[in-house]
Image (cartoon, rainbow, N blue to C red):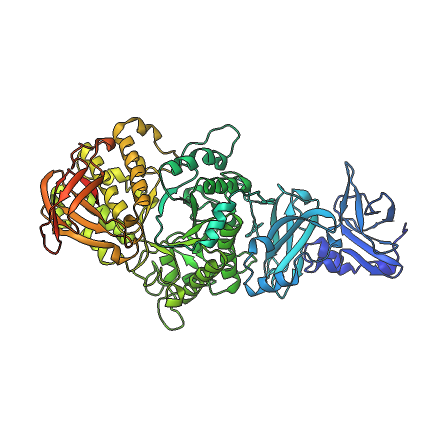
């Protein structure tokens, strides 16, 4: 055992001072084991210790007793040889034996560092963040973070009394990365990064941008998590890998805000677990093909509904653990449900613990507020011209699709990304290099995202919430498009809801609001969205938008749903719409499930279930949702009676479907229209059925088409059109 420290072995006083004042940018050059004359010097910073000894890795043998170099807690000494060791640290009230974090070599591989520096590491959730692992037989956690302009980065947590002097990290300056393996820190430990900025000031403690878990807000620390999960959805994932996202498949999406779908039971189970037992079987029984969650990525302000996230790799701790979230996805897949997440790569909030000025500079955001600050939302805009930021966001997307088996991402606020002058006045924005308003960096990012997802995650979908007429949103990148699979049809939603708000007697003057959507219906691959955006901020509920008295409102909503489910395009309905909830959505309150005790609400719910079943069963209603060959008008210009009729056509051999909508409360008896074939037509859906709360007027389930030409059509039908109703008939 070594005795007094020889003068030759004393560390440089300036370096020691830098450690003590948390200014040292290369702590591994001083701390830990270092070969020296006569053995191996061991140096450690242990504030509050009264004795520090070096022990063998697997024994209690004292190899050296360290000397106190500085009363602030810097210890140094020499052991006979460089071998694995532990430190026994004696405090006045306790003794602890730990491995020395500075005895371990780099825990990031050279390939990882190279790809991270290039912004091309597509498994970012594994490379950065906090990951429990065993290194040289010692359990602990590897921390890694990107902060290229920082002078010093430390991991802080309860395990070191939140003292930034204790665990300064190893710097890889060429890549801007900092990493350290801290022994005996495991899952459940809360932590942050203490960063010394480029100007010598300590920044507010920062949460980990790539953390897999966080504390429950309003607490803001990141949490070490062991998010390994035993999946049982192998059959689903195998099918997903071998089936591309074909447009001819039915897609009917139930959009959900996880925290307010149903009031959580206070029984010890987290929200994800409860949703697995209630939401999943409900959505499956209702016949939807997909469940879409408003953003579940960790976010500081619950009132943002997740649309201002900071934890792009972490499911929100408000709702449960990462393992519980994975279990929910697993359960969805076993129930035959795909899962889509809303994902926000456009902007982020400016909370002090978040991404803004992360290393003391505009790192994730633009420095110029004309490019980097969103005035509408009081948020920062990602600098998509920086390859590390692009890599961060693409890594996030892949994390959800691969690690959590998510089946699709609905990319939020795409329009705000595509235009540099989005919601800005003249002089408040910076043109692109050609002087235009298009955001070339965002376009490049979205195309790169599309190509990477197509390559790495075949069978998954990307859906754009894009509210302008930007061309080719859902066209492949190889054809000059952005590469999304689908785009929300915001124009269809606005026009048709406006039409339904008109009193029926006035609808003749607004006839084109129903018809106009078919002018451009096949210019993109569309989703018809009745989303959360339409039932908030004073817009009222869907049933509240319908005109007429109480009965007519329900009849209008049923007719509208019938129209929507038979209209070209995939379907999306926000929770509560399927039961005709009367009040607009409030994120702090559950859906009014008690309404199902009332027949008219239960009838709407049954209608949505039956429409889903019909849509999924009948190829003509979904196979050519995105193909103009799948639609033909039969009655387009009957303004005076507000009647529309159209054919939905599938592939060769599929039976055609005839849809007739009567958007007035006046029954039409013997209404004549053309048909593509003579013979029997079976009424397979009538939104006026008594089953759904209607007046039960209809065609008795069957009607005969005469061999008599009607305009361009070879046959004629005489139908009974119920009031405010949609009827669907199948040939033969």
Up-down: is 728 above or below 692?
A: below
Vertical position of residue 673 compared to residue 700: above or below: below
Q: In front here: 621 or 2?
A: 621
User: Residue 188: which quarter of the image?
Assistant: top right
Quick check: 688 above or below 470? Answer: above
Q: List x then y, in percent, for residue 677.
A: 17, 50
Q: Is residue 544 left or right of residue 587?
A: left
Tell me residue 236's x, y (percent). Answer: 47, 46
Residue at image coords 73%, 47%: 138
Q: Can residue 362 be seen?
A: no
For the residue pair 375 and 448, the one nearer the viewer reads as 448
Which residue extends farthest top?
Answer: 597
Regarding residue 100, the answer to whether it shows in the image is yes
Residue 153 placement, left or right of 611: right
Image location of residue 42, percent across then percent down: 81, 54
Residue located at (87% from left, 45% from top): 61
The C terminus - image quarter: top left
Q: Is residue 403 left or right of residue 343?
A: right
Q: Is residue 225 above or below residue 471?
A: above
- The image shows a total of numbered marks equal to 0
In the rendering, at what x and y percent does residue 72 appear? 75, 49
């Amino acid at each position: 055992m070594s005795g007094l420290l020889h003068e030759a072995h004393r560390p440089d006083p300036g370096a020691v001072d830098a450690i003590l004042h948390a200014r040292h940018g290369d702590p591994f050059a001083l701390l830990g084991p270092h070969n020296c004359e006569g053995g191996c010097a061991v140096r450690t910073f242990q504030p509050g210790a009264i004795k520090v000894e070096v022990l063998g890795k697997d024994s209690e043998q004292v190899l050296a007793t360290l000397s106190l170099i500085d009363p602030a807690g810097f210890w140094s000494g020499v052991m006979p040889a460089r071998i694995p060791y532990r430190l026994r640290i004696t405090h006045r009230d306790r003794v602890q034996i730990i491995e020395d974090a500075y005895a371990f070599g780099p825990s990031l591989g050279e390939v990882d560092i190279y790809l991270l520096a290039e912004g091309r590491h597509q498994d970012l959730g594994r490379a950065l963040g906090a990951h429990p692992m065993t290194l040289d037989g010692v359990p602990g956690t590897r921390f890694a973070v990107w902060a290229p302009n920082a002078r010093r980065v430390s991991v802080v947590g309860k395990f070191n009394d939140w003292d930034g002097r204790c665990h300064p990290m190893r710097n890889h300056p060429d890549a801007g990365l900092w990493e350290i393996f801290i022994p005996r820190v495991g899952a459940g430990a809360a932590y942050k990064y203490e960063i010394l900025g480029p100007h010598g000031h300590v920044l507010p403690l920062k949460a980990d941008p790539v953390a897999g878990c966080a504390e429950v807000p309003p607490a803001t620390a990141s949490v070490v998590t062991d998010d390994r999960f035993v999946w049982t959805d192998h059959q689903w994932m195998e099918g997903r890998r071998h089936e591309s996202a074909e447009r001819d498949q039915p897609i009917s999406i139930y959009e959900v805000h996880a925290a307010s779908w149903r009031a959580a039971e206070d029984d010890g189970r987290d929200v994800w677990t409860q949703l697995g037992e209630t939401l999943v079987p409900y959505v499956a029984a209702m016949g939807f093909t997909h469940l879409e969650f408003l953003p579940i990525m960790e976010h500081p302000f619950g009132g943002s509904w997740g649309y201002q996230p900071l934890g792009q790799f972490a499911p929100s701790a408000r709702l449960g653990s990462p393992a519980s979230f994975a279990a929910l996805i697993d359960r969805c897949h076993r129930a035959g449900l795909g899962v889509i997440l809303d994902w926000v790569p456009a902007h982020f909030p400016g909370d002090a613990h978040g991404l803004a000025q992360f290393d003391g500079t505009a790192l994730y955001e633009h420095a110029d507020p004309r490019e980097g600050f969103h005035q509408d939302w009081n948020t920062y805009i990602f600098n998509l011209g920086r390859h590390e930021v692009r890599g961060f966001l693409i890594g996030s997307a892949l994390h959800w699709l691969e690690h959590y088996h998510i089946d699709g991402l609905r990319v939020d606020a795409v329009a705000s990304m595509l235009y540099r002058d989005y919601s800005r006045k003249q002089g408040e924005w910076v043109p692109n290099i050609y002087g235009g308003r298009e955001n070339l960096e965002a376009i490049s990012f979205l195309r790169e995202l599309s190509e990477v997802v197509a390559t790495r995650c075949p069978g998954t979908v990307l859906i754009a919430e894009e509210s302008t007429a930007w061309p080719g949103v859902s066209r492949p990148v190889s054809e000059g498009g952005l590469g999304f699979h689908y785009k929300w049809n915001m124009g269809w939603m606005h026009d048709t809801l406006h039409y339904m708000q008109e009193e029926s007697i006035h609808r003749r003057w607004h006839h084109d609001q129903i018809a106009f959507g078919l002018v451009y219906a096949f210019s993109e691959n569309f989703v018809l969205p009745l989303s959360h955006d339409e039932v908030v901020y004073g817009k009222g509920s869907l049933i509240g938008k319908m005109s007429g008295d109480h009965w007519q409102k329900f009849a209008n909503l049923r007719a509208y749903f019938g129209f929507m489910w038979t209209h070209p395009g995939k379907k999306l309905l926000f929770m509560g719409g399927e039961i005709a909830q009367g009040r607009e959505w409030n994120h702090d309150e559950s859906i009014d499930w008690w309404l199902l005790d009332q027949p008219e609400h239960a009838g709407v719910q049954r209608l949505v279930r039956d429409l889903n079943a019909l849509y999924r069963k009948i190829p003509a209603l979904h196979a050519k949702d995105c193909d103009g060959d799948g639609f033909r008008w039969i009655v387009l210009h009957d303004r005076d009676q507000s009647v529309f009729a159209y054919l939905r056509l599938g592939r060769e051999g599929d039976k055609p479907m005839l849809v007739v909508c009567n958007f007035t409360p006046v029954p039409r008896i013997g209404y004549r229209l053309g048909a593509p074939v003579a013979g029997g037509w079976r009424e397979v859906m009538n939104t006026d059925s008594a089953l759904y709360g209607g007046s039960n007027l209809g065609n008795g389930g069957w009607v005969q088409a005469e061999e008599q030409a009607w305009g361009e059509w070879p046959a004629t039908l005489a139908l009974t059109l119920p009031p405010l109703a949609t009827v669907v008939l199948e040939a033969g």
